[in-house]
Image (spheres, grey):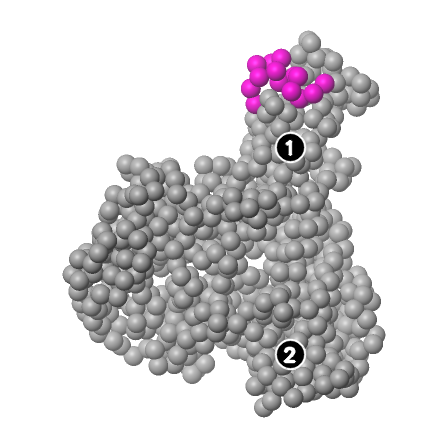
Amino acid sequence: MSILEAAQEETAKKPIKQLDHRYDGIAKVTGKATYAGDFKEPFAKDDLLYAWMVQSTIANGTIASMDSSAAEHAPGVVAVMTPFNSPKIPQPPAQPPARRNLTILQNTDVKYNGQPIAVVVAKTLVQARQAATLLKIKYTEQPAKVIYQDHLADARWPGNPGKEPAGNTRGDIAAGFAKATVTVEGTYTTPIQVHNPMEPHATIAWWEGEKLNLYDATQYITGVKMSIAKTLNIPLDFVRVQCPYTGGGFGSKGSSWSHIPLCAMAAKLTGKPVKLVLDRSQMFGPVGARPSTVNKIKLGATADGKLVAMQQNVIMNAAALEDFTEHSAGPTKMLYMSENNQVSEKLVTVNLGVSTFMRAPGEAPGTAVLEIAMDELAEKLKMDPVQLRVINHADKDPSHDRPWTSKNLKQCYTQAAERFGWSKRSATPAQMTEGNNLIGYGMATATYPANRSAAMAIARILPNGRAFIGSGTQDLGTGMYTIMAQTAAAMLGLDPTLMDVKLGDSTLPKAPVSGGSQSTASVMPAVQEAAMQAKLKLFDMAVNDTASPVHGMKTSDLEAKGGKYFAKADPTKGETFVAIIARNGGKPIEATGSAEPSESKDSMTSQSFGAVFAEVAVDKDTHMVKVRRVVATYDIGTLLNDKTGLNQLMGGIVWGVSFATHEDAHIDPNTGRTVNESFAEYHVPVNADIGTIDATVLNIPDLKFNPLGARGIGEIGITGAAAAVANAIYNATGKRIREYPITPDKLMA
């Protein structure tokens, strides 16, 4: 039996004890948690310089000249980097892990309004910002395309040269629609959305000889390390990246953006540590956004509700710098069983900042539009929306024709509908009222892939009775510290409060990006194996120690609990970890663990699912929408920690409400600049906007996916939630809005 198989068997016997508080909670609420832009050591406080990133004011063209003399002579200014004096770097082509064509002052080209074109470094941030206003910049401007909806005829396949990806068509779509008794067809749109985590992007860089140190606000310390080494053409071992805490990311911090090498270049140029922190307006453009999508959807069904054809053709904006495809047709390919299926995803190149991954990329906008179309189909069939989805439940993955590792979606429908009170819904719109409010109920299906990547961890049993667990992963507020502590503790037989946890340092064993809902599913098996290996080393020490109560036994005959090891057959034969380690040199017992995706990943599909129900109240006079409550049940495998896990699901639902009724980045058609670059105008919900959220999980382990039976949950919460709200708004008002966000002006029209 392998280490992981033994771990799986042991976990099945003894459920992991959950911490009832966040491991890092006290550090955060007391201000002891240090974020990337807050570090003041190991460098001297007075040595730290401040950088300000200067951005272009045109969307397309070149910089003809840049006079920096006034800025260079401004008070406190140490350096001004421009395309005309910046160190030239043999820059490699965009490739993983960077995946970005970085704009780091290597030429004078301008591809979007807001592109970094200079960096001012000064003794204070105020001095750097003031000096930046003194730059005299002249452009040679070229015509720009910024509103992609005006150029849909230019849509193309991704890539150069672009070609249609395989797997876009299943069956005979024309024959399928010919069989349909009922069809629905419409165009559904989603807007550009910006990540806007609480903590903006921030980097502190300093050099020690030829070695580079970075504090960086990131979702992927290993990725930053690899990217910066490639970009600056320095050995990988010469780079160290640290990020013990991340104040949210939602995908924007999963990539290495231009400000990171710019900060490192400024530190090299000045010979001093340099801090570069983006302000809120700079979060719009240089660090990615979710692209807008235009979706033409057509569904066909027989009179009994059976889907016989599904079609979705998507067009979205892509940046002039590089392509990015939001796979929003993904749910149409796999969420419901239909023998005939056709999708396409095309791009229109425009002069905007690069699109990138945002929480539930593909599935968030994909479910937002598909699930409205499903609601329309149910109405046309005069069928309950839940019943329609149950009829078309996919018992296997239709996009790959293979079984699921585990799927319990029908239970989600049943449980959530009962808790919500779905049976009280009026099928006829605009019939439920309360005072001056129209009341509406809506529902939708949630889904997101269960991803896993290779990961490593290191464990130590310490001489003082505590233990250490470490991995080069990140905690975005998701609870990684907490579940690392309790997972390792369960394997070692310790209380989770006796665990010391370290993450967010590239000197630790490698772990994947904290994105794609894969961190828990990837890192915890490695944590489990490292802890198991360390425990086995302790057991081996014990059975070979003549002074040990278990001398001469087999390691398989031993168990650990409460900081002690003992014989399974006779628990009185044993002693503390402290005693055995002290008698054998007093040094920590160390072991590493690694974990790979299971062999079933190519023969089975791992996917999480859920059912989301929403109630809205729409004011008859103002048409203001209030989402009063959301009830959801999810099938996500084993929930490792109730507090952190349910918090993730609730946060996703909040974003789903925001998707439905708030978020929309407005682009000036003349300049290409985002005009609502602040929280005052780029609306996200506050507490007053959110009603009751009741999120639960089935807690059915998916042991074919990983030894803990746990799938990631960081993103599924947003999926389906927007459509549930949209469908509830229709049920309340009788007005079908196919353009997100659904705002009062659209309901008034």
* Circle 1 crowding by C-alpha within 10 Å: few under 14, some 14–19, many from 20: some
At x 64% / y 79%, what residue is drawn? 625
Q: Earlier in the sequence, mark 2 or mark 1?
A: 1
Disc number placed over residue 487 in the picture, else none: none
Q: Label 2 sits on what residue type?
A: Val
Quarter holding residue 544: top right
Q: Is residue 48 above or below residue 497?
A: below
Residue placed under numbered mark 2 in the picture: 625
* Circle 2 crowding by C-alpha within 10 Å: few under 14, some 14–19, many from 20: many
Q: Is residue 580 magenta?
A: yes
User: Left or right of 721: which side holds 745?
Assistant: left
Q: How many marks?
A: 2
Quarter of the picture containing the C terminus is bottom right
- Residue 649, position in %: x, y? 66, 58
Quarter of the picture containing the N terminus is top right
Residue placed under numbered mark 1 in the picture: 498
- Residue 240, position in %: x, y? 40, 40
